């Protein structure tokens, strides 16, 4: 119990005691003391010294532990307007298409907008494309504005300088020494493939022919396929098997055609030989007959 809580009853008892002493002059000191203790009501069985106890700690609600394992997404703008960017810089990360890619800007599969060229970022709207969409573009000069006017010339930075390309001098078919400058060898078979052609050029010094270096790389037949995909590999394998079967069938047909041509040539040669034999025999029979050797009397 606090002392301040007892202050009011004690003050009230003291004030009552002083008033009683002034009013009752004839009463004795013992009677006055009993009245004071009666007003205080201390020491008796019915003592009523009351006090209130208040909470010393403030109450609070249930404590919730936040999940700290969530990875922040870090969405929003990474480059503001007129910021300098290089190819590959992320301009805006978003979920959905709040902003759309504009001039010289690409969009990834997670709707992230990135710069394709070196320049400055521009946020703009293009009512000619869409009335409600907002676009992000990149311009080469900071003072340029987007969107570009309709049918305006498109600006591109290729990193090249204009130069005049002189056409090569025409190459003669016959060299000064009287031999051809180019020799072409065809492939084998009745219908050779153009890929089997071998082109040889006459060297600058001497009389030798040599194939150009850039043509040697075209002789190697490579297959370009996506690595790591079993389905794609099986598809290319089946296609290659079909191609091999087609080549074998074609070679077999060519072999049969060559054999047929050879048989036809042999048959034609035998028929010609037989016809020649018949002609010679007929000529010999006509020469040995008497009508041919002795003139007839009518003609004489």
Image (spheres, helix red, strand yellow):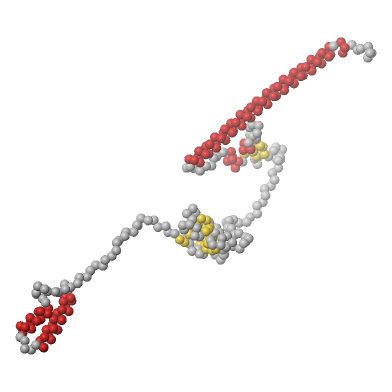
Whether 124 is drawn above or below 208: the answer is below
Q: How far across and how far down the image is residue 29, in percent?
A: 5, 84
Q: How far across and how far down the image is residue 268, in percent?
A: 72, 23
Question: Which residue is pictured at 56% across the width and 62% down the height?
Answer: 131
For the question of whether residue 104 can be seen, the reply is yes
**Location of residue 214 by image quarter:** top right
Question: Which residue is pictured at 14% across the width and 74% down the height?
Answer: 49
Whether 32 is drawn above or below 130: the answer is below
What number of labels is visible?
0
Residue lying farthest to the front in this orientation: 46
Whether 137 is drawn above or below 197: the answer is below
For the question of whether residue 140 can be seen, the reply is no
Q: How far across and how far down the image is residue 293, in percent?
A: 87, 12
Question: Is the N terminus in the top left, top right, bottom left or bottom right quadrant?
Answer: bottom left
Question: Is the C terminus in the top left, top right, bottom left or bottom right quadrant?
Answer: top right
Q: How far across and how far down the image is residue 165, in percent?
A: 65, 52
Whether 205 is drawn above or below 23: the answer is above
**Location of residue 294 by image quarter:** top right
Residue closest to the eye, 74 or 116 = 74
Residue closest to the eye, 162 or 17 = 17
Question: Which residue is pictured at 52% across the width and 37% down the height?
Answer: 237
């Amino acid at each position: 119990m606090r002392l301040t809580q007892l202050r009011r009853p004690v003050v009230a008892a003291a004030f009552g005691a002083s008033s009683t002493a002034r009013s009752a002059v004839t009463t004795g000191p013992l009677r006055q003391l009993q009245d004071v203790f009666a007003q205080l009501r201390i020491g008796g069985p019915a003592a009523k010294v009351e006090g209130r106890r208040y909470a010393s700690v403030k109450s609070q609600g249930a404590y919730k532990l936040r999940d700290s394992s969530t990875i922040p997404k870090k969405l929003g703008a990474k480059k503001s307007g007129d910021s300098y960017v290089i190819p590959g810089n992320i301009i805006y990360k978003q979920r959905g298409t709040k902003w759309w890619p504009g001039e010289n800007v690409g969009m990834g599969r997670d709707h992230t907008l990135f710069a394709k060229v070196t320049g400055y970022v521009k946020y703009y709207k293009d009512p000619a494309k869409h009335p409600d969409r907002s676009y992000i573009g990149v311009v080469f000069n900071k003072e340029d504005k987007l969107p570009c006017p309709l049918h305006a010339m498109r600006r591109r930075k290729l990193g090249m300088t204009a130069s005049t390309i002189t056409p090569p001098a025409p190459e003669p078919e016959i060299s000064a020494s009287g031999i051809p400058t180019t020799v072409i060898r065809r492939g084998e078979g009745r219908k050779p493939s153009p890929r089997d052609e071998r082109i040889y050029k006459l060297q600058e010094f001497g009389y030798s022919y040599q194939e150009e270096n850039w043509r040697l790389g075209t002789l190697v037949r490579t297959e370009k396929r996506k690595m790591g995909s079993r389905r794609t590999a099986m598809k290319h394998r089946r296609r290659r098997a079909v191609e091999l079967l087609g080549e074998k069938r074609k070679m077999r047909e060519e072999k049969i055609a060559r054999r047929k041509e050879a048989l036809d040539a042999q048959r034609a040669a035998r028929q010609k030989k037989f016809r020649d034999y018949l002609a010679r025999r007929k000529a010999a029979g006509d020469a040995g007959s008497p009508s041919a050797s002795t003139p007839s009397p009518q003609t004489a």
